Image (tube, helix red, strand yellow):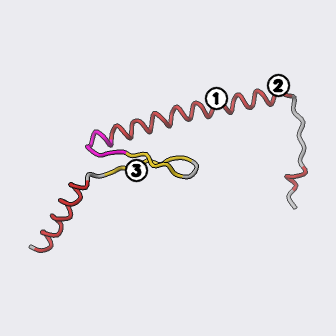
Amino acid sequence: MSLRNAWKFQYPCSQLQEAARKKREYHAERLKWWQAEQNKVIADVREKGLEVREQEITRGARGEIVIDATYQRRLNECFSKVKEH
């Protein structure tokens, strides 16, 4: 049996409030930083002529880089012709 369930701590409300405020500020700063990083990556990908799509998934979202199907078909054709010749 874990002793974790038996632990008891007593803190004044002001101390808990300060800890919660610091945690909120930390996560707000990290969110801002990661959003800026995400925007940089998306801009870089789009600058290279690719598309970025956001896919909704359970508990959030994920980004997906999409290559134009025309380029993919042409590249496949080139590989096939190189092998053929």
As drawn, the residue found furthest toward the bottom would be 84
Q: Of the residues shown, which amino acid type is indicated by label 3?
A: Glu
As drawn, the residue found furthest toward the left would be 85
Task: Judge from the rendering whether residue 37 lies leftward or rightward of residue 2; answer left or right.
Answer: left
- CB-based contact (under 8 Å), mark 1 and mark 2: no
Residue to which mark 3 is pinned:
64
Image quarter (top left, top right, bottom left or bottom right) of the C terminus: bottom left
Tell me the SS state at disc 2. helix
The residues colored magenta run 45-52
Splitting the image into 4 quarters, where does residue 19 fall?
Answer: top right
Tell me the SS state at disc 3. strand
Whichever of callouts 2 and 3 sits on the residue coming sooner in the sequence is: 2
Residue to which mark 1 is pinned:
25
Residue 42 magenta? no
Whichever of callouts 1 and 3 sits on the residue coming sooner in the sequence is: 1
Tell me the SS state at disc 1. helix
Q: Position of residue 17 (x, y in %)?
A: 78, 28
| CA–CA distance in space, label 1 to label 2 | 16 Å
Crowd around label 3: few <14 · some 14–19 · many ≥20 (10 Å): few
Task: Judge from the rendering whether residue 60 lies leftward or rightward of residue 46; answer left or right.
Answer: right
